[in-house]
Image (cartoon, coloured by chain):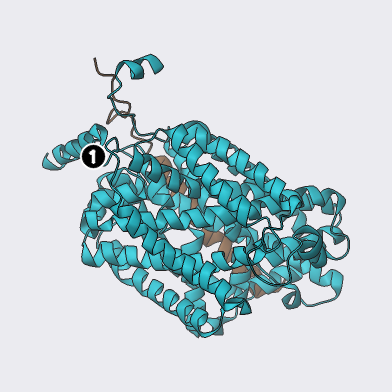
Chain colours: A cyan, B brown
């Protein structure tokens, strides 16, 4: 193979593909199932009506999550490119949307890896229950050595730095190996492993005393919550983040799909697997929290937390108290590591693919340069005494004004300004088994932007009325607002940098032949 | 567990995992269409 490519130096490299639909589905599930499914969904559901939350949740999934997922699939699959190239091929004016998504992924990748590194350490800590009887003091004090006040310091914390280095080394190896040998294989191994480990964790939690109380708290419906608009907003908000839609991942992954692939049929499996995993996580987490409440003589409502507090304070406490706690810790933190890695590689792939397309670089070149660059930023900013403040701030702002605002602008531009939905609907319906016609267009052009406008407005008002978390103004100004605004400016700058002469934007016979074939098929 | 919590748990599992089962059945009924279009284009002479 290598001789044939050197014999024809001018022949462009073929675009990589997933070798089967099954591997694409596994990788897309791996991307969608992340930390949020485990540590965010259970709390959101509990806090927004318990069992009654199922209604707004399913409504959000069917009327916004899945339609937006298919929009991403259609763009990536029809225009066969990284986010910037795919949007550019859709319309020249849409290119900055792609770069915006690439930059959002850059920020997310930099801090997401840090949480994987923590989880890696906590998997090891589980054996000895290193946190003793003060999980909170251990996490913030001994482990993270968090500084008193937010700032930008370079006091490195070795117990975070080295596992983070290890995480990046593993991730870089996966990225360099490419779609088939790297991303597909990693997902084919890690996702089934995650499922088995998490199932074992759920079963173990269900046998703990007090588990039933936890499940009662989680599933008992509060029907009055359905009259509260904020509950519906929480459902739409959660679905957007949970499905990994609207920031380039699904555009990128679907661009590696073979031409004749059932997009919507595959997407339904991805979407419902993601939700199925969340329900499972809710059962496991609340069974464990029920046990924790009983052990400490408190009500379930008093011990409920989410995010970092759930994973690194509540769970260690549970591990210390539960029979076979060490096993439980390994299963829980190991699940976080695997769920995190399969999501992180999808986030990185958005950037790698964009660099490959823009500069005409090969896989190895682009993935090494991109991964090392993101790793360098990640390693220099986050494993420090002030890293937690930075992580918290960048996460909050990139979610609100990167992902959510970005998704809103993308949907409005595609649906209302460029009016591309009929074209994309036709593409989805060419091969797919579940047809997306008028209803899909109404949902994407109507319900989705309405939900997103509500979310963005809400976030804007909250974040402008009080300084985020009471952190210093300059800190939130630079790493919150400044970062989020900087991404938009930089996206425009990247759009104006010309595409390399070797780039596929100028010369892509493979894409041209696909376009020609499709034109022929339509004419028949 | 209280009856209402049990009912809601069953409803949640049946709708979400049932949805997954339906999606899988749909996909299985429509196997990948490998032959229709040569994906690996023949090497040019």
User: Is A45 displayed left or right of A270 in the figure?
Assistant: right
User: Would you identify the image quadrant in which residue A135 lies?
Assistant: bottom right
Relative placement, left or right, of A173 versus A491 is right
Q: Quadrant of residue B35?
A: top left
Mark yes or no: residue A224 visible: yes
Is residue A200 something one can see in this rendering? no
Q: Which quarter of the rendering shows the C terminus of chain A?
A: top left
Left-right relation of A476 to A125: left
Q: Relative to residue A367, is residue A283 depicted above or below?
A: below
Q: Identify which residue is drawn at 29% across, 54% down.
A: A496
Residue at 28% x, 38% y: name it.
Answer: A504
Residue located 27% across and 31% down the image = B36
Q: Nearer the viewer, residue A10 or A251?
A: A10
> Which class describes the residues within 10 Å of circle 1: few (<14), some (14-19), or many (20+)?
few
Q: Is residue A333 above or below residue A287?
A: above
Q: Secondary structure at mark 1?
A: loop
Residue A116 lies left or right of residue A492; in this view the side is right
The extreme left residue here reads A523
Q: Residue at x 60, y 37 (%)?
A: A189
Pointer 1 residue: A506
**Chain ID of residue with mark 1:** A
Q: Say if A209 sits above or below A10 in the image.
A: below
Q: Percent from the top left, x then y, of residue A503?
A: 30, 38
Task: Give residue B29's position: percent from left, percent from top.
Answer: 39, 41
Nearest to the observer: residue A473 or residue A198: A473
Q: Give the number of marks.
A: 1
Residue A109: x %, y % from top left: 54, 52
On the rendered image, what quadrant is the N terminus of chain A found in? top left
Q: Position of residue A418 (x, y in %)?
A: 21, 62
Viewer-closest of A390 and A175: A390
Q: Does residue A194 sit above or below A449 in this rendering?
A: above
């Amino acid at each position: 193979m290598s001789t044939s490519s050197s014999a024809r130096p001018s022949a462009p490299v073929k675009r990589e593909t997933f070798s089967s639909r099954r591997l694409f589905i596994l990788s897309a599930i791996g991307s969608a199932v992340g930390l949020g499914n485990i540590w965010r969904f259970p709390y959101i559901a509990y806090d927004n009506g318990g069992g009654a939350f199922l209604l707004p949740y399913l409504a959000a999934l069917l009327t916004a999550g899945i339609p937006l997922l298919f929009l991403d699939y259609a763009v990536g699959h029809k225009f066969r490119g990284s986010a910037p190239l795919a949007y550019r091929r859709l319309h020249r004016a849409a290119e900055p949307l792609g770069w915006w998504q690439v930059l959002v992924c850059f920020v997310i990748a930099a801090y997401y890896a840090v949480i994987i590194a923590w989880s890696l350490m906590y998997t090891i800590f589980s054996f000895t229950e290193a946190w003793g009887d003060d999980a909170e003091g251990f996490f913030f004090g001994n482990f993270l050595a968090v500084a008193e006040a937010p700032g930008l310091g370079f006091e490195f914390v070795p117990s975070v730095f080295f596992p983070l280095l290890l995480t990046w080394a593993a991730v870089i190896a996966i990225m360099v190996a490419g779609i088939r040998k790297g991303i597909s294989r990693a997902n084919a191994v890690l996702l089934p492993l995650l499922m088995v480990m998490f199932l074992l964790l759920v079963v173990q939690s269900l046998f703990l005393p007090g588990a039933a109380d936890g499940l009662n708290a989680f599933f008992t419906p509060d029907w009055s919550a359905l009259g509260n608009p904020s509950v519906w907003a929480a459902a739409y908000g959660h679905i957007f983040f949970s499905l990994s839609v609207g920031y380039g991942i699904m555009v990128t992954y679907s661009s590696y799909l073979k031409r004749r692939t059932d997009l919507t049929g595959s997407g339904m499996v991805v979407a419902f697997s993601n939700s199925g995993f969340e329900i499972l996580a809710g059962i496991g987490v609340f069974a464990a929290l029920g046990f924790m409440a009983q052990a400490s003589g408190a009500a379930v409502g008093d011990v409920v937390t989410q995010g970092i507090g759930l994973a690194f304070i509540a769970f260690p406490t549970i591990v210390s108290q539960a029979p076979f706690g060490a096993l439980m810790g390994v299963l829980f933190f190991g699940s976080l590591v695997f769920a995190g890695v399969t999501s992180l590689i999808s986030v990185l792939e958005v950037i790698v693919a964009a660099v490959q397309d823009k500069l005409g670089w090969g896989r190895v070149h682009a993935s090494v340069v991109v991964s090392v660059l993101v790793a360098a930023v990640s390693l220099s900013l986050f494993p420090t005494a002030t890293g937690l403040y930075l992580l918290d701030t960048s996460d909050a702002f990139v979610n609100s004004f990167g992902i959510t605002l970005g998704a809103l602008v993308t949907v409005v531009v595609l649906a209302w300004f460029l009016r591309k939905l009929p074209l994309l609907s036709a593409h989805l319906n060419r091969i797919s088994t579940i047809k997306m016609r008028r209803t899909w267009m109404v949902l994407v052009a109507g319900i989705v932007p309405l939900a997103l406008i509500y979310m963005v407005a809400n976030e804007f008002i909250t974040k402008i009325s009080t300084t985020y978390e009471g952190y210093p103004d300059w800190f939130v100004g630079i790493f919150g607002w400044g970062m989020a605004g900087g991404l938009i400016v930089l996206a425009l700058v990247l759009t104006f940098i010309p595409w390399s002469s070797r780039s596929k934007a100028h010369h892509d016979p493979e894409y041209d032949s696909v376009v020609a074939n499709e034109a022929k098929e339509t004419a028949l | 567990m209280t009856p209402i919590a049990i009912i809601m748990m069953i409803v949640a599992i049946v709708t979400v995992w049932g949805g997954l089962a339906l999606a899988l059945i749909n996909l299985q009924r429509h196997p990948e269409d490998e032959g229709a279009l040569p994906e690996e284009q023949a090497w040019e002479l």
